[in-house]
Image (cartoon, helix red, strand yellow):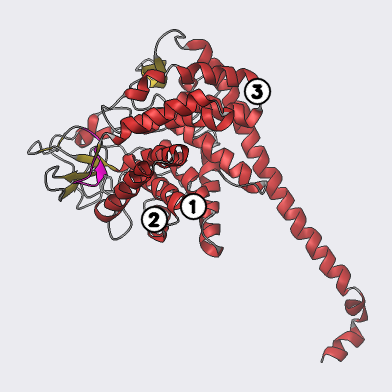
Amino acid sequence: MKNKVQRHFPYLKKNKLLLLGAITVLVCSSNALAQNNGNKLVSDNFDFAKRQMVHMLENIPQGEAKMPHSINGKGNTSCRSIYWWTSGFFPGILWYINEYTGDKTFESFAKKWTEKLEPVKTFKGNHDIGFMMYCSFGNAYRLTQNEKYKDILIQSAYSLATRFNPQVGTIKSWDSWRSWENKHVFKYPVIIDNMMNLELLFWASKATGDPSFRNIAISHAEKTMKYQIRKDGSSYHLACYDPETGNFIKGETSQGYSNESTWSRGQGWGIYGFTLCYRETKDPRFLKTAQRMADYYINHPNLPSDKIPWWDFDTHRPGFIPGKFSKTNKYIQNYRDASAASVTASALLELSSYVKDDKKKIYTETALQILTSLSSPEYRAEEGKNGNFILKHSTGAIPHGSEVDVPLIYADYYFLEALLRYNRMINNKPIL
């Protein structure tokens, strides 16, 4: 049969090498096109972010110890105290723009706004010092190697570590939590967001040689993995513990639709947090947990086709009942959360670097879909509008009646972080 084909089509044999060469050229051309498209996605967004942040810097108070957070009822930029949990994101954005563009002016901006946060290094009022200081001073030290920034980060880690209770094995998020049913006040609440603060502790152990920071982070992650991550890979926003016995009492929510629902940004925090724990420990349990949480997000039937989730995966679904005093009950309309999407995109890109084959492809493609959607006019603001924030349509805390369908500074931060990670990936560089 082979000889018969060759008699009728002798050129096939002669041109076999040419055919293989042509296929190789097509594959390489396709890869180059994808790389070019990816580079354009990143560069277009950073060009826009740079212009938008110039507008932001021109319109916010310069002398006050406050940071951009969202918008007010009039659509103008609203700022919060440096002791508010989101204070580190704006300086972090300035560092990311400096990192991508190499613009020294933005390095000066970043230093100025980062250094406003130095007093926070001794803050012990909640767990959020990790967000506040690692997103600002963490990026500052990574890019400048300034020893002053290193010292501030180490002091911040000591402050965070004071909230660890060995009996419970976790870092206490808030000093107390009253349930939405108003029946109980829990004295040791831990929220899934807390997984993000562990990065500061892992860094501090490497910077100081003191293993206690790392041990605290691992203990917290193990306890969270055991009690806050459900069997299907979804998550409780909040875990309540007994501070005396260390026993887990129950799972609840502060910012989700109901106690048993899955708050989408919390799911993103979890994917990100367990991924970074695997990075720092190489413990396969953390990798498995990150994958379970990512698969839940990606495969959920309520995830819209553009991959930007509703603020909670279970909003208005039968069987999910908000607490009596939750303001969720007042909202009939459903809302997307761009901040949940940006956190998840960044997490998925790192997670993709620790897995192979189909999983790697799925996580990478989902992250790219998210970034592409967020880059569209549906989610990315027009220049000079949206309070000069980059992204629209984030949802902060519907149960509290707060920040519904507005820009939020952390959505912008993780969007730019994800773009930087994607840029490194397509240019064959380490993601971190």
- Mark 3 residue type: Asp
- N-terminal of the two: label 2 or label 3? 3
* Tag 3 and tag 1, C-beta contact below 8 Å: no
Question: Can you tell which quarter of the image residue 16 is in?
Answer: bottom right
Mark pair 2, 1: CA separation: 11 Å
Which residue does the numbered mark 3 point to in the structure image? 103
State whether the magenta stretch is mostly helix, strand or loop.
Answer: loop
Q: Is residue 423 above or below residue 145?
A: below
Residue in the image at 44% along x and 9% along y: 61
Which label was assigned to residue 351?
A: 1
Q: CA distance from mark 3 to mark 1?
A: 30 Å
Local crowd at mark 1 within 10 Å, few (<14), some, or many (≥20)? many
Answer above or below: position of 324 versus 271. above
Highlighted range, magenta: 165-174
Pick the front one: 73 or 105: 105
Q: Give the Cα distance between marks 2 and 3.
A: 37 Å
Q: Which residue type carries mark 1?
A: Leu
Can residue 393 be seen at all in this image of the molecule?
yes
Q: Residue at the left extreme?
A: 183
- Residue 173 is covered by the magenta coloring: yes
Tell me which residue sits at (20%, 46%) in the image.
168
Foreground disc of the pair 2, 3: 2
Image quadrant where residue 377 sits: top right
The verdict on residue 24 being magenta is no
Residue located farthest toward the top when viewing the structure as drawn: 63
Give the residue at x 37% y 57%. 289
Q: Amino acid at mark 2?
A: Phe
